[in-house]
Amino acid sequence: MYVQLALVCDDARVREDGKMDIHGIFNDLIAPGFPAKQERMILVTTICWDRSDEGRNKFKVDLVGPDGRPSLTVDGHTDVDPRPAHRPPPRTRLVLPLEEVVFPRPGEYRFEIRVKGKRLAGPSLFVMEAESQEASAEG
């Protein structure tokens, strides 16, 4: 099993034809101060499963801060269907809306997906403080 796609964006939707529309992908956030709060963002992840992973699989997604501790955790599960060898391996698309996410301090935050005893790397965000108008004028 591995992460095939991982990003953070403003909006994502899975269409009826199975394709996904993704809008406003970002990797950096600028905050006026800390702790900072992002009103809304969407974590999009596609996990490609091994053929032996069929059945119900629990997962946990942590947003890990610069101090190495989770500042947000989401628990869930997914059902993985069996697939014959002539078809693509099973995939799970996670489109997780996250509301009012708090970032206690500046630095790099990364999403980690824990499933079946493994830690899979998700996307990362770099959160920084906005430069003040005064500091910008002096520079």
Image (cartoon, rainbow, N blue to C red):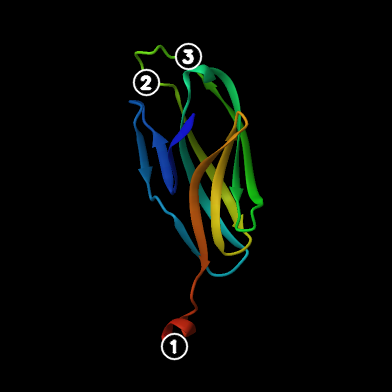
Disc 1 packing (10 Å; few <14; some 14–19; many ≥20): few
Separation (CA) of disc 1 from disc 2? 57 Å
Q: Secondary structure at mark 1?
A: helix
- Give the x, y percent position of residue 47: 47, 31
Q: In the figure, 64 relative to 60: above or below? A: below
Image quadrant for the C terminus? bottom left
Q: Amino acid at mark 2?
A: Pro
Q: Marks 1 and 2: which is nearer the front?
A: 2
Q: Marks 1 and 3: which is nearer the front?
A: 3
Q: Amino acid at mark 3?
A: Pro
Question: In this view of the protein, which residue sits in the foreground, 14 or 80?
Answer: 80
- Residue for point 45% across, 59% down: 28
Q: Secondary structure at mark 2?
A: loop
Separation (CA) of disc 1 from disc 3? 62 Å
Judging by the rendered image, the residue that carries numbered circle 3 is 82
Judging by the rendered image, the residue that carries numbered circle 1 is 138
Is tag 1's residue or tag 2's residue first in the polypeptide sequence?
2
- Give the x, y percent position of residue 138: 44, 88
Question: Which disc is residue 88 wearing?
Answer: 2
Separation (CA) of disc 3 from disc 2? 11 Å
- Residue for point 55% across, 54% down: 109
- Residue for point 65% across, 49% down: 70
Q: In the figure, 80 relative to 128: above or below? A: above
Q: Amino acid at mark 1?
A: Glu
